[in-house]
Image (cartoon, coloured by chain):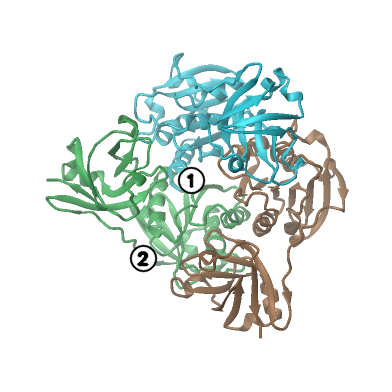
Chain colours: A cyan, B green, C brown
C-alpha cells in the first residue's frame, strides 16, 4: 500500500521521518513516497495546489497524508477525505479538498477514535501523533467509518477564480515553481472558451509590467532568455523564460495579478 | 529490515545515494529511510539530537546509520552500538550514544573486520565504504560480534546540562528547527521539579533579551506574531512565535544561553 | 527492481513525485531511489558527473532515469542506453553517456513506441510522460528493442580533458560538492603518469591564486582551516579545506582552470 506525505516541515529536522517511523511501526509493508516537504510554511493554498498536481498520478487506493497545519492542537478537526480513487488524511483547513474534488469527493470523516492515535498525542505534532497512525491503519485495511462520524461542514478552500470580460481575463499567480516558471490560475479551458488559445501571441500584464508574449509548445522552442507563454503540464497558463527564470525577469511573486488582454 | 540514514552530506551530491546503492547491492530487500542529510556540516551535537528525536519512533530492530564525521579516515574508530531496541552504526565521536543511552545502551563494538567493508575503502568516504556495508550485513542477520571486539572507552557526547538555582534555570538553545522554533535543553522534568511548569507565564532571557512569555499548549493558541513558550513534541521547553519565526524575532542562534527566571 | 531518479527539478514542486506515482502505477513493486534532484538547472555536465559517480554503486540491472532536459518537447530524442550492467533512460543530450561508457556502452535505442508513454504526452514534462513510464515498462521486463530502433548518432558529452606538458597539468573544476570541496577533472591515473602523485605537495593554481598544497589522505589529517589536496572518493584530484569550504577560501566556481605545476 502506498502512503504519500506532503508538508511544510522542511528536510532539516526529524519531523518527516518521525511520521515515517510511526507508519512503518504500524504497517511494516507500506511504501512511503514524499510529495514535498518544502511547501512554504503555513501556506495551505500552495500545499493544496501541489497535492492536487501530484495525486492523480498515483495508483488507485493510494493514501495521501498532507500536513500544512497552522491550527495544530487547536479546535480544527483531523479528517479523512474519501474521494473516488484515493483517500486523504490531514487537517480540516481546506488543504485536502481541492485534490479530492478534482477526482470526485465522496465523504469526509471527522477523525475522533483515539484508538488509532499515538498513545500520547502531543499538542504540536499531529503529523506524527494523529495523521501518520490514522494513515497506517487505513493502509492496514481499517474502514474509514471506524475512525469517526461523517461531517458536511468541512472547510472548503477558497481559490481565486479568474474573472472574464470582453477586454481581459484577470487571474493571478497560483504557484512559482523551482525553475521560476509562473503558473497562473487561468486554465486551458478558460483560454479556449475566450478563443485566446487560438492566437499566436497574447498581451500579458504581470503586476505592473505588460508584454506581448508568444505561445510556445515548450521552453526550448525559443532562444535563450526569451519570455514565452504555454499551457503547462497541469493545464494552466504558464509564463516562462527559456533557460531562465520568469520569476526574476518579471520580478514576480505569489498572488500577483495576471491579466490576459483579449481586445 | 529498515535501515535509516542521517548525515551532513546535503542532497545535492551523489554521496547519500552511493550509500543506498551499496546497501541494496548487499541486502536487496532493505527498506531505506532518510532521517535527514541536512545536519549542519560537522555538527555532531545537532546530528545526535536529531537522531535521538527520530529513533524512538522506528520499529524495534531498526538499524540507524549516522555519519557526521569530521574525523573520517583518521584514527577515529567505526562502531556498532547495540541498544535495547535498535542498532546504531557510525563513527566513534559521540554521535550515536545519546540516542542509544535514551533507550538503554547494551554494548559498543569496534568494527575492524574488513570482510564486511567495501572491497576498496577510500579514506574520505566511510559512509559508503564502511558504515553502509556494515549496516547491510547487520540487516542480513550477521551478528554484531562478528564485526569486531567490544570496547568501553568509546566517546561520550558532552551535552551542556542546564544548571538550576533558586533564581533561575540556565540552559541553552539545543536546536533551531526549520520553523525557527528555539528548542532548549531544559526538559519538562526540570521545569516540573522547579515548579515552573505550573505557572501560566515565565520570564525568559535569550542572549540579552528578556521577555515574559505565556505557556501555551500549541502555536495556534495565541494570535499571529505572538511569542509563546510550550513543551515541544520531544519534551523540551521551546520558544516559538505563532505563524512566525522565533529565530528571527529573538535574533537567536544555536548555543545561545536561555534563562528561565524562577523568583 | 530498482529505478533511480536524477533531475534538476528541485524538491519544492510535485514534479519528482509525479514521476514516482507514474512508475508505481505501471510497476507497483519498483524500488525507487533518488540520486539527486538538485542538479543545477539545465547543467547537463553536472548531471552527467553525478550520475556517473552514483551508478557504479547500484546493483546490476538497475534502471537509471536522468532528466536534465533543456530541450524537452523539441526534436531532441528520448533514448534508452544499454550498458554492460545497467540501463539508462533520458534525453539524448549527453547526460547518460558518460556513466554508460564508464561501465561499457552496448547500444542506444531511440524511443519512439508511444504504447509505452503516458496516454497524453505534454510538451514540457517528458520526465513524467515519457521517461518514467518507459523505465517502469523496462522494470516490468519489456525488452529495450520493443521501444524503438538502435541509433549510432547519439550525442556524446564533451568533457574537457586535462592537457599535460612538462611544466603543468591544466584541468578545471568539474564539480563543487556541498562541503565546498573542489573536484577537478584531473584523475589519479594522470597524476600517476606524470609522477605528481609521488610528491608530498604540489603547487596548484586555481583561477588566479597559486598555492603550495600538501597531499593528505583525508580531511582530518591537517588542522582546521588548512587547505589540502587529496584523491577523492571517485578518483579525482580534489582541493579541500579541513572543516571548512575550499569554495569559499579560493572563491572558486565551476569551470575554473586548475593548474598542477610539475616543474
Give x and y (percent) for residue C15: 62, 38
Check the image and report above or below for C183 versus A14: below
Report the quarter where the N terminus of chain A lies: top right
Check the image and report above or below for B25 versus B146: above
Q: Which picture quadrant has residue B240?
A: top left
- Residue at horizontal 43 percent and vertical 46 percent from the top: A14
- Residue at horizontal 28 percent and vertical 53 percent from the top: B172
Q: Which element carries disc 2, helix, strand or loop? A: loop
Side (left or right) of C140 relative to C5:
right
Q: CA distance from mark 1 to mark 2?
A: 28 Å
Chain for mark 1? A
Outermost residue, bottom side = C263
Report the quarter where the C terminus of chain A lies: top right
Number of other residues with Cα within 10 Å of mark 1, as a class: few under 14, some 14 to 19, many 20 or more = many
Of residue B144 and residue B76, the one placed in the foreground of this image is B76
Of residue C150 and residue C195, the one placed in the foreground of this image is C195
Give x and y (percent) for residue A186: 63, 25
Give x and y (percent) for residue C205: 61, 75
Side (left or right) of A3 relative to B156:
right
Q: Which element carries disc 1, helix, strand or loop? A: loop
As drawn, the label of residue B155 is 2
Residue highlighted by disc 1: A11
Does residue B261 appear in the picture of this structure?
yes
Side (left or right) of A153 relative to C240:
left
Amino acid at each position: 500500500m502506498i502512503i504519500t506525505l506532503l508538508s511544510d516541515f522542511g528536510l532539516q529536522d526529524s519531523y518527516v521521518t518521525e511520521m515515517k517511523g510511526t507508519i512503518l511501526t504500524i504497517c511494516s509493508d507500506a511504501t512511503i513516497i514524499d510529495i514535498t516537504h518544502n511547501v512554504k510554511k503555513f501556506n495551505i493554498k500552495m500545499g493544496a495546489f501541489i497535492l492536487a498536481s501530484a495525486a492523480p498520478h498515483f495508483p488507485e487506493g493510494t493514501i495521501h497524508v498532507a500536513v500544512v497545519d497552522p491550527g495544530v492542537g487547536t479546535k480544527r478537526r483531523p479528517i479523512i477525505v474519501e474521494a473516488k480513487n484515493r483517500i486523504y488524511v490531514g487537517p480540516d483547513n481546506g488543504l485536502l479538498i481541492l485534490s479530492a474534488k478534482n477526482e470526485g469527493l465522496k465523504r469526509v470523516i471527522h477523525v475522533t477514535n483515539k484508538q488509532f492515535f499515538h498513545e500520547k498525542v502531543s499538542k504540536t505534532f499531529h503529523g506524527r501523533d494523529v495523521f501518520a497512525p490514522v494513515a497506517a491503519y487505513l493502509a492496514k485495511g481499517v474502514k474509514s467509518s471506524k475512525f469517526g462520524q461523517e461531517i458536511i461542514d468541512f472547510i472548503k478552500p477558497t481559490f481565486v477564480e479568474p474573472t472574464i470580460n470582453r477586454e481581459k481575463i484577470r487571474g493571478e499567480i497560483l504557484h512559482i515553481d523551482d525553475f521560476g516558471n509562473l503558473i497562473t490560475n487561468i486554465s486551458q479551458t478558460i483560454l479556449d472558451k475566450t478563443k485566446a488559445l487560438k492566437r499566436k501571441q497574447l498581451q500579458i500584464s504581470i503586476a505592473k509590467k505588460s508584454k506581448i508574449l508568444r505561445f510556445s509548445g515548450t521552453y526550448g522552442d525559443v532562444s535563450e532568455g526569451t519570455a514565452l507563454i504555454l499551457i503547462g503540464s497541469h493545464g494552466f497558463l504558464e509564463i516562462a523564460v527559456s533557460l531562465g527564470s520568469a520569476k526574476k525577469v518579471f520580478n514576480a511573486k505569489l498572488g500577483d495579478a495576471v491579466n490576459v488582454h483579449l481586445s
